[in-house]
Amino acid sequence: MSQARHSTARSLAAHAVLILYTVIALFPVFVVVINSFKNRRAIFADPLAVPTPESFDLVGYRTVLAQGDFVLYFQNSLIVTVASLFFVLLFGAMAAFALSEYRFRGNMLMGLYLALGIMIPIRLGTVAILQMMVASGLVNTLTALVLVYTAQGLPLAVFILSEFMRGVSDDLKNAGRIDGLSEYTIFFRLVLPLVRPAMATVAVFTMIPIWNDLWFPLILAPSEATKTVTLGSQVFIGQFVTNWNAVLAALSLAILPVLVLYLIFSRQLIRGITAGAVK
Amino acid sequence: MGALTLTQVTKSFGATEVIKGVDLNVENGEFCVFVGPSGCGKSTLLRMIAGLEDVTSGDVAIDGVRVNDLAPAKREIAMVFQSYALYPHLTVRDNMGLALKQAGTPRAQIAQAADKAAEMLALAPLMERRPAELSGGQRQRVAIGRAIVRRPKLFLFDEPLSNLDAALRVQTRIEIARLHRELGATMIYVTHDQVEAMTLADKIVVLRGGVVEQVGRPMDLYNDPDNTFVAGFIGSPQMNFLDAGKLGLRSARLGVRPEHLVPGGGQVSGRVSHVEKLGGETLVYLASDDHGLLTVRLFGEQDYAVDEVVGLGFEPNRAFHFDAEGRRLR
């Protein structure tokens, strides 16, 4: 009896802490979203108030949809994020498989070299990257962004995935070899499904910085045709006047796609397909 | 159909030599068990036969054909792993059929082979389930079924019973023995459990530190061990090693099996330190001043009190003589 009451108290306390954290984390998002539905005066008069019939105004969304080509910006952001994510996961997983599975000279050094990128920010190389893109004629293309983001995401992906792949049963891979599966089949059909939760983690960590990045779109692809959402929203932030309605509306819209991607991956995070497969 | 020959096989990982020149012949249809303590190289040797590890030097030949550079799938072998290693995304039927499918066997033939294996192992009602929906014993039967379906020249077992509980272990052991009789196939079986080795094997290979200590039929190893290691490893409880000098003999050590030490004699004496009554037999542990801890195995229920002093005797022709290096003196 007392044991049961005790554990209820504990779970209440745990939930209180978690709820508090959730409120703190979601508060800025909440403020951005509610204010995007208010008129300019209401935003400044009482920033924390929810929209009322008097203060409700969709002017921000109207501006965003009218000015600039936001559908195109969204499309650009999505293409860059999804393509980069795909390449990071594919090449990251392949490199991680090689590092964890095969004994070869310099394996350890190669692993360290690939992990080094976690510690060195890619922005340090911006000038060199820009020169390279200019030389190869890739400036103002989405390809440039995809290449840079793939390079940026790989170190962490290789690092996390190689740790997880070491945990995949050797017996399973060997059973595949004896049954005549190729190394590619073993990688794609046996190992990848088992490290799916790790892939989802890497995907989330890789995706968000790419979606939110302003630096490389501004430097490598600032043309109208290749603008991303974050870069596109900047037109509303002026040196002297900022169109807050439009900025908040653009930001609210920018949350949506990334939220959808997150939901897709988080389902993978939860699904425990490996349960009971080995041992 | 599946003879195996190893000729001076060695294996090194970097500078460490794990297998130090193994020669072995396994006849067609033989059940051969590699046994030894952990780290003796028995699993490595099995993996070399399977082609999962490269051979550093020497030759591995199956049916007289050198297979050193052949991929595992081309060696016509099948392997059963300790962790079962079933494909988690495939049903039992597909798990069994995958190797044949890879080899391009017609679908009807695969289904027939899988059904036949399922019948042998009583797996028929489980064919459409996935590994996650099976118990440990069922999974191991599927793993064995997967091996049978391929009709390999060689069956390789890597400690297949270690993850099962005691009752299931005995049951599966009997099943493997039955399969060996029915299929008549050559089987190589790795275990650290000498009971499994004794009960299953036609031929036991005792390994220690990458070296073959002795090869022979179970009873040959039991009744005629080459050295103290084999004598101590085969048989449970372990053989007693007496200090032969203290008994006035010329050899260094004298090995006597627990069942051959009989109370009442005068050659050795000791103080009872512990008694284990198992119903059918009684194990008496004695501390002896001259020879250390001794084990006596007696038939039926016997009453001994702790601290009681017991005199022991043995028939001299039942004892094994060993020299100072542990080699048998015959």
Image (spheres, grey):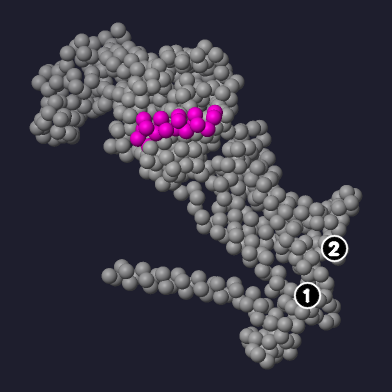
Decide: is A120 above or below B212.
Answer: below
The residue sitting at the bottom extreme is A54
Q: Amino acid at mark 2?
A: Ala
- A161 shown above or below B198: below
Name the residue at the top extreme.
B330
Give the residue drawn at x 74%, y 74%: A250
Residue B292's spot in the image, x, y percent? 24, 26
Q: Amino acid at mark 1?
A: Leu
Highlighted magenta segment, given as a residue range = B105-123
State the predominant SS element of the stretch in magenta.
Answer: helix
Residue A225 marker = 2
Under tag 2, what secondary structure?
Answer: helix
Q: Is residue B152 visible?
A: yes
> Which chain does tag 1 point to?
A
Identify the image quadrant of residue B191.
top left
Placement of B231 over or under B302, stated as above or below? above
Q: CA distance from mark 2 to mark 1?
A: 16 Å
Residue carrying label 1: A65
Image: B13 above or below A276? above
Residue A199 at x, y percent in the picture: 60, 51
Q: Secondary structure at mark 1?
A: helix
